[in-house]
Image: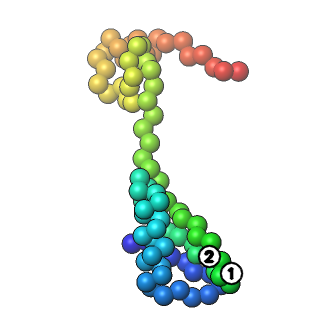
Amino acid sequence: MVNVNVKNGELSQAEINAYIAHGKEKYPEKTIESMDISLDGEYVDVEYHFSDIPFQRIRRITGYLVGTLDRFNNAKRHEVEDRVKHSLS
């Protein structure tokens, strides 16, 4: 369900559905959470608001690309604890 806010006028449900379908076509990899449709005479401004995309941080630790340390054995965990962390400042 997409929450739609129409400003400065009214649109039929068919027109709103067309703008939703256009957004889904234009941004197939994203999920539209809501949209603002602003009317100004013959001009229409559409602003899409998307759901957050889950992001997992991947780091290179002790030669391995990992997201979490849960699969490391005790030796690798100690190796991570003993690392020297460098700052960019």
In the image, what residue type sits under mark 2?
A: Val
Residue 88 sits above or below residue 51 on the image: above
Residue named by callout 1 = 40
The image quarter in which residue 32 lies: bottom left
Image mark for residue 44: 2
Taking the spot 42% from the left edge, 13% from the top edge, the residue there is: 62
Residue 78 sits above or below residue 39 on the image: above
* Tag 2 secondary structure: strand
For the N terminus, the image quarter is bottom left
Labels 2 & 1 near each other (Cβ < 8 A): yes
Tally the numbered discs.
2
The image quarter in which residue 45 lies: bottom right
Residue 11 sits above or below residue 64 on the image: below
Q: Residue 18: image x %, image y %?
A: 45, 76
Q: Residue 21: image x %, image y %?
A: 42, 70
Image side of residue 68 versus residue 50, left or right: left
Q: Residue 49: image x %, image y %?
A: 53, 63
The image quarter in which residue 7 lies: bottom right
Taking the spot 41% from the left edge, 53% from the top edge, the residue there is: 29
Image side of residue 55 versus residue 71, left or right: right
Closer to the camera, 87 or 50?
A: 50
Closer to the camera, 20 or 1?
A: 20
* Tag 1 secondary structure: strand
Closer to the camera, 22 or 51?
A: 22
Taking the spot 42% from the left edge, 38% from the top edge, the residue there is: 56
In the image, what residue type sits under mark 1?
A: Asp
Determine if residue 51 is in view: no
Closer to the camera, 20 or 89?
A: 20
